[in-house]
Image (tube, rainbow, N blue to C red):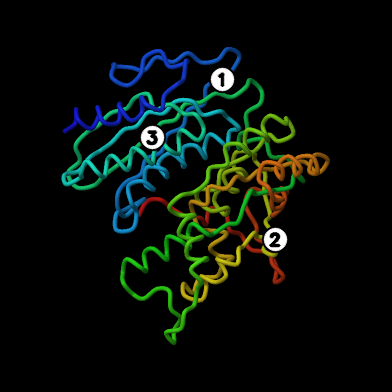
Amino acid sequence: MERDLIAKIQRLAGVRTKDSSVLVNIGDDCAVIAPSPDRYLIITTDTLVESIHFDLDYFDPWHLGRKTAAINLSDAGAMGGNPRWAFLNLAVRPGMTDRFWDNFSKGLLSRLSEYRVSLVGGDTVTAPDRLSFSLTLIGEVEKGKWLSRSHAQLDDLIYCSGNLGEAAAGLKLLRKYKEKRRPFEGRKGTHAISRTAIKRLVGKHLDPEPRVTLGQALAESGLVKTAIDISDGIATDIAHVCKSSKIGAEVWAKEMPISRALKEAYKILGISPLNLALTGGEDFELLWTVSKRNESEVRKIATEVLGYRPFRIGKIVQGDGVLLKTSQGAKEITYQGYEHLT
């Protein structure tokens, strides 16, 4: 089984690998890769565990493969890097079919191939009761032009690349559907949310879009030094920036990018859109800070990549945490985002 699975993935990956930097591919004890000169390597890894990060009752294997890739690609984007090579580790429980692995592998490779990433190695083990996927991604970044969490400056403005809270709402809709509680109806049995909204929110959870190209453009500009991908909700992810940069931040409730679809979901979820935007995880949008003098040029760069204007949601201030400013005042929301532990 293990040899067959490795051979299957090797065959599928080999068809898509046309990377001259890969000298030794899947099948040897180590991959051998030749990085570009005058560039640094970036390395990130993420793990998805069944019943914690995904549920096969509503996650098909193709989307699961794509998301396994996307969460690592999102990290590379947050560094402004160019992802190049991937290593996949699988903990395989009994009962998984060849069709599952075919579709998982095709989904994974379809997302990696969008950024010309080569799958070059990994490992498989047997698990007693839960599937687990770990993907390690290696990429390159030009010397002196990578983004980090640690360079936010006082009075910098905080921007993000897209609507927030949608992935969290999508997950809650999927869980309600799994529990067969007629989730898409209001209290009186009337239709409470459009099919368009459902598709958008569920799609944001199942198949997030990593902002790799945007991160690269911001890094290349030399005008942005600090960025982070929004994986745990901005209440936590901005707090990471604050801690690393030894500074505080305030975010503005009235400027939160909240979609019409998320507002529709409130009718059946009963959770405020603002709360989901602040604390919901796995949006995988990009958040960055920029000085006021460079704001206009950076906004133009981001708009060209995204096809719409990015969202200014706050600013860097004195202090050591994250404050939410509303019409009623301010309250601390530091590290009140999503936890991937239960």
Kindly indicate whether the residue at mark 3 contacts the one at mark 1 (C-beta within 8 angstroms): no
Task: Name the residue rendered at 63%, 63% in the picture.
Answer: 331
Q: Quadrant of the N terminus?
A: top left
Cα distance, mark 2 to mark 3? 35 Å
Dot placed on the residue nearer the N-terminal end, 1 or 3: 1
> In the visual, does 146 lie left or right of 87?
right
Cα distance, mark 1 to mark 3? 20 Å
Q: Position of residue 54 (x, y in %)?
A: 35, 52
Dot placed on the residue nearer the N-terminal end, 2 or 3: 3
Q: Is residue 13 above or below residue 334?
A: above
Residue of label 3: 135
> In the visual, does 24 lie left or right of 330?
left
**In the image, which disc is placed on residue 40?**
1
**Label 1 Cα crowd, 10 Å radius (few <14 / some 14-19 / many 20+):** some
Residue of label 2: 255
Secondary element at tag 2: helix
Secondary element at tag 1: strand
Badge 1 amino acid: Tyr
- Pick whichever, 304 or 151, lies toward us: 304
Q: Position of residue 43 (x, y in %)?
A: 47, 28
